[in-house]
């Protein structure tokens, strides 16, 4: 058994955009596990936009990431040693063990998963937190009805791609917003959205208007800024807006909203949410998501960086929109 562990810590707090210098790769001793604990060899790290907010020392819905400590985040891996009766060596597990090769857990927050029909990595994406986020925001906030039009920003991402496919399954018209013709082709072709608007083409509102001739009944917002403004202009009366993320402002950029009046004029319901505060829905959501992934009715993509040392650059790329689907790091 190895006696050392490799991890990435937050070396300093970013000023604006995150940079590689904000992180540090370390080699640290790996202690022996105690009674009740398990040792997990992480195979995949999940990289998610919310991590950028935690890097700041600012009031938010979660405590800031501590300096000089392992970067937090979701993991999928294999139990290699167990002194906990609930787990055995060889179990595939997901948890929050952070940016490191090995993690030690007392079993709380660690879940065994079945990889016979679903790949291990998918439990960090469509059959994990991003999938549940999509499921909750769509079903519990937007509450779509057949025939309605649902707009999804960041539609090629891990969350947005699931929202649109679930909306289609509910009998809705799904319209995505994504950056670039390649991503829009994936959204409309592979994920089956009815249309996808390329916000980089310079005609965001005009193209969105053409794609939503009957207006917009539900908006799943991941970006903020210009996509949010354009969508608010298209909202129908009594529309619902699920605010999942505001990635365009995560690095401190201004994120003006000029169409706030639409909320009043159209009597919109606008609700932000954090999926970890709704643990009661996770079992129901995960059952549906797992079945859809297993039978092929829910499609997903992954962008995978290789090696622990690649995590900072992959994370920076995620914030810049260079990924398609779920951004992972494979710990080779």
Image: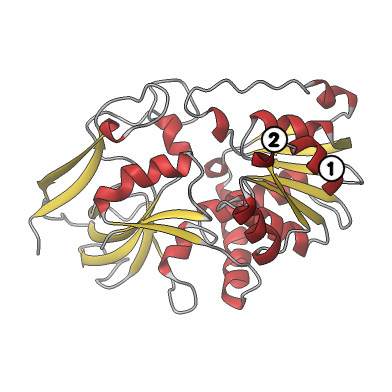
Point out the image quarter for the N terminus. Answer: bottom left
Residue visible at 75% across and 57% down in the picture: 167
Distance, label 2 to label 1, CA atoms, is 13 Å
Q: Quick check: 211 left or right of 81? A: right
What scheme was used to colour the molecule?
secondary structure
Residue 127 lies, in percent from the top left, at 53, 62
Q: Residues within 10 Å of mark 2 (few under 14, many from 20)?
A: many
Q: Quick check: 221 left or right of 43? A: right
Quarter of the image where one finds residue 173: bottom right
Residue visible at 64% across and 32% down in the picture: 224
Can see residue 45?
yes
Q: Which residue is mark 2?
A: 227
Vertical side of 284 occupied by 291: above or below: below
Q: Residues within 10 Å of mark 1 (few under 14, many from 20)?
A: many
Can see residue 113?
no
Vertical side of 297 occupied by 212: above or below: above
Residue visible at 79% across and 39% down in the picture: 240
Label 1's element? strand
Q: Which residue is mark 1?
A: 216
Label 2's element? helix
């Amino acid at each position: 058994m190895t006696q050392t562990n490799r991890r990435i810590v937050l070396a300093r707090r970013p000023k604006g955009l995150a940079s590689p210098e904000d992180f540090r790769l370390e080699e640290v001793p790996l202690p022996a596990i105690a009674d009740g604990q398990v040792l997990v060899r992480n195979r995949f790290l999940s990289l998610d936009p919310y991590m950028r907010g935690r890097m700041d020392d600012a009031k938010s819905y979660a405590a800031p990431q501590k300096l000089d400590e392992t970067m937090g985040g979701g993991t999928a891996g294999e139990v290699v040693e167990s002194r906990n009766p609930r787990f055995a060596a060889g179990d595939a597990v997901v948890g929050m063990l952070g940016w490191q090769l090995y993690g030690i857990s007392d079993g709380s927050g660690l879940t065994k998963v079945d990889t016979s029909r679903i790949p291990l990595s998918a439990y960090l994406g469509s059959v994990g937190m991003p999938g549940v986020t999509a499921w909750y925001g769509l079903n519990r906030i937007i509450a779509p009805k057949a025939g309605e039009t649902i707009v999804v920003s960041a539609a090629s991402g891990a969350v947005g791609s699931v929202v649109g496919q679930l909306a289609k399954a509910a009998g809705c018209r799904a319209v995505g917003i994504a950056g670039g013709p390649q991503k829009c082709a994936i959204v409309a072709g592979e994920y089956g959205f009815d249309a996808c608007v390329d916000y980089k083409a310079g005609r965001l509102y005009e193209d969105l208007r053409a794609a939503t001739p009957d207006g917009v009944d539900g908006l799943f917002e991941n970006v903020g800024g210009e996509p949010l403004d354009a969508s608010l202009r298209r909202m129908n009366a009594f529309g619902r807006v699920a605010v999942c993320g505001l990635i365009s402002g995560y690095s401190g950029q201004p994120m003006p909203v000029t169409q706030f009046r639409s909320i009043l004029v159209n009597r919109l319901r606008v609700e932000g949410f954090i999926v970890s505060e709704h643990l009661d829905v996770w079992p129901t959501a995960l059952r549906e998501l797992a079945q859809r992934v297993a039978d092929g009715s829910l499609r997903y993509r992954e962008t995978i960086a290789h090696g622990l040392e690649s995590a900072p650059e992959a994370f920076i790329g995620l914030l810049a929109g260079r990924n398609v689907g779920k951004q992972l790091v494979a710990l080779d």
